[in-house]
Image (cartoon, rainbow, N blue to C red):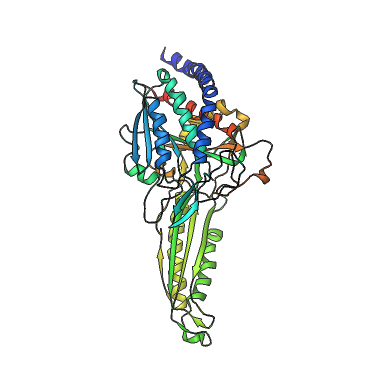
Amino acid sequence: MRKLSMLFAPLVFSVAAAAQSADVDRLADSVEADVIAWRHHLHQYPELSNREFKTAEYVAKFLRSLDLEVTTGVAKTGVVAVLDSGKPGPVVALRADMDGLPVPEQNDLAWRSTQRGEFKGQDVPVMHACGHDTHMAMLMGTASVLTAMKDQLKGKVKFIFQPAEEGAPPGEKGGAEVMVQEGVLKNPDVDVIFGLHISANADVGTVSYNPGGTMAAVDPFKIVIHGKQAHGAYPWKSVDPITTAAQMIMSLQTIVSRELKLIDDAAVVTIGSIHGGNRSNIIPNEVEMVGTIRTLNHAAREHVYEAMARKVKGIADSMGATAELTLPLDYNYPITFNDPALTAKMLPTVERTAGKENTILAKPVTGAEDFSFYQEQVPGLFMWLGGKPLDVPVADSPAHHTPEFYVDDSGMKLGVRVMANLTLDYMAQHGE
């Protein structure tokens, strides 16, 4: 009898999931106009990292209207709401980020941003130039849908609206790392977390995913080379830190090109800034370089750490100089790592929601996301949602973090449906 029930279990789940999906579709249709209106408001009034005060008030007011248990001031401006079904089951977390960027909007929209903010002591324009406005609006829509389907839930849903994904201002801490430190994944303890990021370069109606390392770890570094100053006409009297820096830059590139197995995972070592000297005829005493490392698996990350230290010391020694390597420099992000078992388990949900033809296995990217801090603690799945209008060629689609950045409203309803169905299906599979 037990074998027979196990045989029919997938069929029973499939029928139930289809029925729930129909409810999700109906409710997503009914809330779409609200999602668009929320997105327009949030886009028109963006705020910078760790300064999302009015944004947090707007989100919290809506969540309270759903009679959810709402906590504010998490990691400074974060908002967390809990939907309790009253039935035993897992705790599913859903995350959206809230901060805008110091970018001047150049789109001709009725709801374009004209807001200003302070960044590094300067008055700057502020824009949602990475789609965080859509992330919030979609999660608000998902909260609305799941609250209406409370009787079909098994367990709890934790809605996380996170500040400072783009990085806290200098001298401050923020984002997912601080939310985790302040217990966002506890009380109730989260079992799994899902997140979506809108993409201006992927067609509306598509969802892209990648099991394992999907976005890179970020490790900024600084190298200070100490030499011996001399007149530029008498270089033999110097220990030249500029020549040493030149050799070091070229050698560091061979970590990726000659030491890592690039057919498995990409990696990047970039020197972004170099400073040394102030006159044409003086060899300076010191050179400072800063850069970034991007890796997509733990072994590569560890190898780059070891190789950086080895090469910096070896080249400095060979030139008679000394060098100090600070790695990581001031912050670092882990790898955004999609749990392979969780990804495989939830893939049928995504395919059922978006359609198999619109569910795309994507290559990993060397950009980064602090969603990775949640995934260090609990299994997580982070995916890309298409936001590019179908009539716009990819070559003409504006890049993220630019004044022309734009994603279409029509892509958000799928995001609501995906997040709601992931929650319902995971609960159905793990509910007591």
Q: Is residue 211 visible?
A: no
Residue 326 located left or right of residue 25: left
Q: Quadrant of residue 79?
A: top left
Q: Position of residue 256 (x, y in %)?
A: 53, 58
Q: Hey, which residue is sitting farthest top in the picture?
A: 1
Residue 252 located left or right of residue 427: right
Q: Residue at x 35, y 31 (%)?
A: 70
In the picture, which quadrant includes the N terminus?
top left
In the picture, which quadrant includes the C terminus?
top left
Q: Position of residue 216 (x, y in %)?
A: 49, 49
Q: Nearer the viewer, residue 8 or 29?
A: 29
Q: Position of residue 67 (x, y in %)?
A: 36, 24
Q: Residue at x 48, y 27 (%)?
A: 420
Residue 123 located left or right of residue 395: left
Q: Nearer the viewer, residue 162 or 120?
A: 120
Q: Residue at x 56, y 53 (%)?
A: 262
**Vertical position of residue 264 compared to residue 226: above or below:** above
Q: Position of residue 88 (x, y in %)?
A: 34, 22
Please tell me how many numbered marks the rendered image carries: 0
**Vertical position of residue 291 compared to residue 201: above or below:** below
Q: Is residue 387 visible?
A: yes
**Vertical position of residue 349 compared to residue 303: above or below:** above
Residue 175 located left or right of residue 280: left
